[in-house]
Every structure is written in C-alpha cells, then in structure tokens.
Image (cartoon, rainbow, N blue to C red):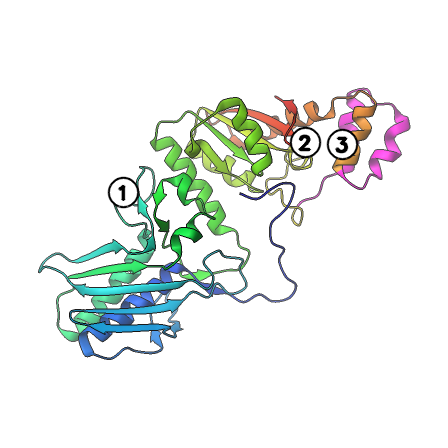
Amino acid sequence: MKDEPDAGMRRPEGPLRTGWTTGACATAATKAALVALVTGDFPDPVAITLPKGETPEFALAFEALGDGYATAGIVKDAGDDPDVTHGAMILATVHPAAPGSGIVFAAGEGVGTVTKAGLPIPPGEPAINPVPRQIIRAACEEVCDAAGLPADLVVTISVPGGEEIAAKTWNPRLGIVGGISILGTTGIVHPFSCSSWIHSIHRGIDVARAAGLTHVIAATGSTSESAAQAIYGLPEIALLDMGDFAGAVLKYLRAHPVAKLTIAGGFAKMAKLAQGALDLHSGRSQVDMGFLWEAARDLGLDEGHRDRILNANTAQEVLETTRDADIDLAAAIADKARAFAHDTLRGAPVAVEVIVTDRAGAILARV
C-alpha cells in the first residue's frame, strides 16, 4: 500500500507502449513448451491467440527439453505500465498426464496457491485466473489437435522470485500464498489503466464477504489505514487497499454489500470525496477551494478569511486556517464525504463511517 498523500508513479508524457499480462506470457510459454515436447523443436517466436482475436508473437528467453517434459520461458514486458511483474521470467513446464485427465494446472516456484474462498479460483488451486486458464487450454488443444494427440497434460507455471514480487501485491491479504497470480482478461496491459488495482479491490471485497466479515476498511494509504485499524483491529482480509479508487469500492459494494464500511484518508483526499470525486488522484481531481470556503463559512468562519482560503495553495493550508479560527472543518468534510458515499451506494445496505487523519496518522474527524 502506498503512503499518503500521493506517492504513486506519475504517468509519463506522450504516447505510451502497451504490454502483455502474465496470463498472455504464460500461454505463450506453455505453447512453446508443448510444441517442443511434441516435435523436439521450440518455436521462437511463438504466436498465440488472445481473447479478442489478436495474435501477438513472443520471443523465448529460456528453453529446456528433457525426458518427458519441456520448459519454455518468456520475460514479461508490461510496456510503459508501472507493473511489479515487469521483467519477471514466466516459465511453463509441460509433461503428459494420465489418459482422460485433461489439462491440469500446477503452481511452480513463485506462483501462489489460493487458500481462501471468494476468489474466482477455489481454495487449493494454483492462482491462475480463469481467462489465462482458458487461453492456455485453447493453445494446448490447438497443438494437440494438430498432432493428433489427446490434450492430457500437466501445465506448471513458475515465476522465479515471484514470492518476493507477491509481497508488493494484494496476494497476502487475499489469502494467496507462495507467489504471484497469473492474471489478465484481454492479455494486453494498457499503461496506467489501473484495471489491476480495481480488480484487486473487487477481489478483496469478495474474500471479505466469503469469510463472513461484516465490516471492511477502505483507506487511501498506509497512514490512514493504520489509524482506522488501531480502532478496530480487524483481520487483514478486512483491509481494502482503496488508494485513490473510492468509486471502485463504492460501486462494487452497491451489488456486493458489507454491513459496515469505514473510509479513511487524509484531509485533502476526503475533501475531494466530499465534493463528489470518485477518483482521488491528484492528476485526475483537484480540491475545490471554493467548496472548502463555503463549508467553512457555513460553520461560522467570517468573511475576513475568504480570500485567504480561496487563494490557498493546498487543502492543508485551508485546514490550518480554519483550525486557527476554531472551526472544525475536518468534521464537516467527513460528514459531507459520508453523505456522498451513501448517495453513491444508492440504497445498498452499507453503513458508512468516514475517518479523516493528518499526515502523521492522528484522527482529525470521525463521522
């Protein structure tokens, strides 16, 4: 989880290069290994078909052919996306399985195993998501059909160093142990699309619900999360790494409600939520000083402070101005943020609490 207030990577200027998901890389590695197992030669580059019909080619970075098995490896290229798996080696080892067994997936080094309910893959299975499984199966069946062989195979996906990479992801909180997940719905990584983060938020809610939890905390960063967790001491799976994506949390909870939601964040982030922003990133929403002035005026701040607030450089400056005047603006912002969150939930049975913290984690308001 990132620290507050805004420690994410910045989108570079100009056109951005797309990349490939771990699922696409695993599919290409599997196909190359299977072709080598059948023919004795590795196709390099190896072409695969993605869910929307694209047919990219991948260069091999590793080849090994032994007695009854073949392994191929591809280095993941995430394009210009700040993906933690960029540069990782995705390995696939294929060997024949018992007749009639079909295609069986296994988790090798650095690929996680699911241990909790609520994810698209049941507990005990390797953390290879449904779409990657689908395109890997299709690639295997294509090769086997062409060779006149049954598609009875064990496919083991490995990612050396994957356990260390997984520590930077949501996997530990989701109950995925031992490594990363093999992900992707289209096979293509669109830089800074944030789809993987939003996907993780949704899976976090699914896991919390499947565990029977009735209260989750959605925080903008580690500081505010620690402050809220110090109050409640909830299990780790109740902690949603919301970051800037308040909309992803609230919209998913509309259809998948949890009895209580605590939203925690710094004053500036909660001010954005209060004024109606669902994406709280500094590059996609700005604090409206006019909104803060009106809120402060409604609390009794005199007109002599108007220009100072409207011309303030930061939300923090506004907060300090109002505190000096004995105006509890943080509480008013928390109340407005809570009201907007309830409006966004559109009647879903979720009770909302908002906690506003300062940069050191002290609680400024709790509504």
| Amino acid identity at mark 1 | Pro
Q: Nearer the viewer, residue 65 or 171?
A: 65
Which residue matches tag 1? 122
Mark 1 or 3, which is nearer the eye? Answer: 1
The image shows residue 351 at horizontal and vertical percentages of 50, 23
The image shows residue 300 at horizontal and vertical percentages of 81, 19
- What segment carries the magenta color? 285-314
Report the residue at 30% width, 73% height from top: 63
Q: Around disc 2, counting alpha carbons within 10 Å, would you say few (fewer than 14), some (14 to 19), or many (20 or more)?
A: many
Q: Nearer the viewer, residue 212 or 115?
A: 115
Query: Label 2, label 3: how many angstroms apart (C-alpha)?
Result: 17 Å
Q: Nearer the viewer, residue 309 or 44?
A: 44
First in residue order: circle 2 vs circle 3 = 3
Q: Around disc 3, counting alpha carbons within 10 Å, would you say few (fewer than 14), some (14 to 19), or many (20 or more)?
A: many
Report the residue at 29% width, 64% height from top: 92
Which residue matches tag 3? 292
